[in-house]
Amino acid sequence: PRSTLFPYTTLFRSVRQYLTIFGSVEPAPAARDQPAGGVTVSLPAPALVASVDCQPGQHVDKGQLLFTLDARAADAAVALARKHQESATQQLNQATADGPVITAWQRLRTQFEKDLADAALAQAEMQASMLHIVAPISGTVLSVQARAGETLAANSPALRIVDPDRLVIDAILPAWQMRDVHPGQDVEILSNGPQANGPATQPANHPSTESSGPMMGKVTLVDGDVDPRNNMGSIDASLPAGEPLRPGEQVKLRIILLEHRDVLTVPAESIVLDENGKPMINKVYRDV
């Protein structure tokens, strides 16, 4: 029965022990059977951009055209390689028609030159086809640095694509705390925005009895390395698909280290100190 001294109702709740850390939303790393959740497209050499066929915020499918590089030099190289290939073909045909008039060595040399011309044409055509830059993964275009009429520098990012359904949370924490974290542990994800869900975060190793349904994920990776400069390590936590979080967004994580389900809880006001200074709960009985 409820005591008149403590006008509260005792409840059976789940008591959890948390480790609270901070992290940022990032594309998932490449897995054994899946590409990375985000890619940055760049060029190995400077090139002039001819046209751009995408814009930030647009969804693109794998293989879809993103932008095209200037093709004048490549087209000229293909035309020259094709002329050399045609000339080598004519010479080989002539050598074959001459038959015994030419030596076997001359026929072999003519065949070798024809093979070289074929390879040069194939390489030129391959280089020309690489001027059409297509999406390596399906996802959302986050940023576009390529501009029609401008030259892209070598290795500079042209655009970035991220699959919104393959995001994780990358977080760092002190090495001494990593011993308590393991793949598969449940994680509460608390957004820092005005609509932040879930209760206020508790200090590490502080048992909490509050719950209002935050986003839930799991620890997917515990990095085995520690940065010796700051003695910090990193972990990844999964992010449920469809959640309104964007790459780069900062979030709070509460890793559930320990959970006791359906245990009797009482208000904090019910806890008092005994004569030895230790916390205790007084049992108050009502006469019946």
Image: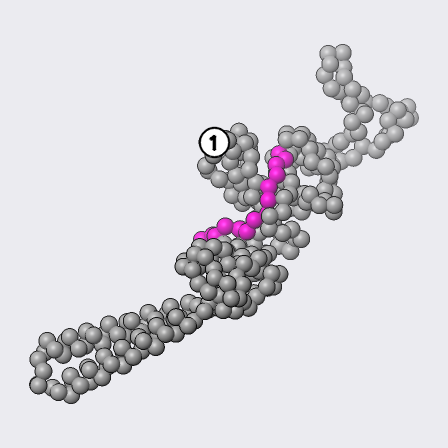
**Residue 99 appears at what percent x and percent y?**
11, 86
In the image, residue 253 above or below residue 97: above
Left or right of residue 262: residue 40? left
**Quadrant that contains the N terminus:** top right
Q: Residue at coordinates 63% horizontally, 44% vertically from top-left?
A: 250
Task: Name the residue nearer the viewer: 283 or 126.
Answer: 126
Left or right of residue 216: residue 139? left
Q: Amino acid at mark 1?
A: Arg
Please rate how many residues cluster around mark 1, counting C-alpha atoms within 10 Å: few if below 14, some from 14 to 19, many from 20. Answer: few
Task: Name the residue nearer the viewer: 213 or 176.
Answer: 176
Q: Which residues are magenta?
A: 19-33
Q: Residue at coordinates 27% horizontally, 75% vertically from top-left?
A: 118
Q: Is residue 69 magenta?
A: no
Task: Name the residue nearer the viewer: 237 or 43.
Answer: 43
**Main secondary-structure element of the magenta-colored stretch:** strand
Q: Can the viewer see residue 46?
A: yes
Give the residue at mark 1.
229
**Quadrant that contains the C terminus:** top right
**Residue 110 appears at what percent x and percent y?**
17, 77
Q: Residue at coordinates 22% horizontally, 76% vertically from top-left?
A: 114
